[in-house]
Image: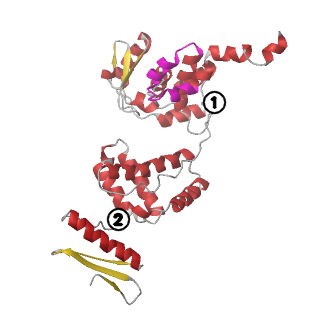
Amino acid sequence: MAIQQTDDGRWKVDVEPIKGKRFRKTFKTKGEAQRFEATCRAKVIENREWSPSTADTRRLSALIESWYDLHGHSLRDGLRRRKKLDALAKRLRDPIASRIDPQAYAHDRRVRMEAGASPKTLNNELGYLRSVYNELRGLGVIKYENPLALVKPLKIQERELSWLTNEQIAELLESIRNGCDNPHVELVAMICLATGARWSEAERLQPGSIRNGVITFSRTKSGKVRSVPISPELEKKITKHWKRYGHFTPAITSFRRALARTTIRLPKGQAAHALRHTFASHFIQNGGNILTLQKILGHSSLAMTMRYAHLAPDHLRDAISLGPHAAQVT
């Protein structure tokens, strides 16, 4: 028997092109069955070891587990990513990974956005999920294309970067000095203001990180080490502080409380990060070079640093001298 119709109307293929090489499969139509039989006969004649591939019915959760075992565990935020991916698989009812429905994913994304998830968070999750497929395909774990390859990220409205004036900086430091129970808050804030460091980068500094007037930041967001010079006064202050209080301990909560006691109001999510924006903004306004700023901040792309370019003095003067209003007042 090669092709035979079953009682339920389907077509069963039972073919043995060569002795010991037998293939069986059932199809909805006779044409599909005939094509399968012809393929088996031709392929086995060309290569005796050939065998038709079976459908990949692994669930999304199984692929996430494989991704974490083979790649995700090596990422700094691998465990955090896996938790988000596991939650996503659960919301989608753990579909067969090769057949994940882009529309079902898009619907889940809409529901999550209406529940308060930010577009940036949702775009990050889409990137994580795509990475699972891309990494596993590169490793040969799966053979099919990424089923979400054509799903577009959400468009994000760029937010204005908040930065502090000199008066606001003075008000913030005064609030820190007068009301913080954590002795490290003021110095961590000063390091961020002096170097453009992220709060977490400043908190992780060790005595060996400061030498000859230069702070070296490691374990950064980009994974690259970068060094930024500081004033002798700040270096002495840091050294003296560590001798008295020891290494920095987590102080972000105390910083937020100090900020809340001021008249400063910042957009959601820009509390400690506003210190980094403040350094960059003042650097550019005082005539700093945009390429130098990129190196100081550790941006991998100049496009990230260009967000501050509009603050350059020349840029502001051009708005006055080159705009259409200039012709009207001469």
Q: Amino acid at mark 1?
A: Ile
* Residue on which the image places disc 2: 58
Residue 113, x across and y down, in percent: 58, 53
Q: Amino acid at mark 2?
A: Arg
**Residue 174 visible to an observer of this rendering:** no
Residue 223, x across and y down, in percent: 36, 33
Write the start and end of the magenta stretch as one range.
Answer: 285-307
Q: How many marks?
A: 2
Identified at 25% across, 78% down, the residue is 15
First of labels 2, 1 by sequence position? 2
The disc placed on residue 149 is none
Magenta span includes 305: yes
Secondary structure mostly taken by the magenta-highlighted segment of the chain: helix
Magenta span includes 161: no
In the rendered image, the residue lying farthest to the left is 19
In the rendered image, the residue lying farthest to the bottom is 7
Identified at 63% across, 13% down, the residue is 314
Determine the image quadrant of residue 173.
Answer: top right
Residue 19, x across and y down, in percent: 15, 75
Helix, strand or loop for disc 2: loop
* Horizontal side, residue 53 vs residue 221: left or right: left
Identified at 60% across, 16% down, the residue is 285
| Front tag of 2 and 1 | 2
The N terminus - image quarter: bottom left
- In the rendered image of this protein, does residue 194 appear above or below residue 30? above
- In the rendered image of this protein, does residue 320 appear above or below residue 179? above
Of residues 119 and 34, the one drawn nearer to the viewer in this rendering: 34
* Residue on which the image places disc 1: 264
Helix, strand or loop for disc 1: loop
Determine the image quadrant of residue 143.
Answer: bottom left
- In the rendered image of this protein, does residue 110 appear above or below residue 78? below
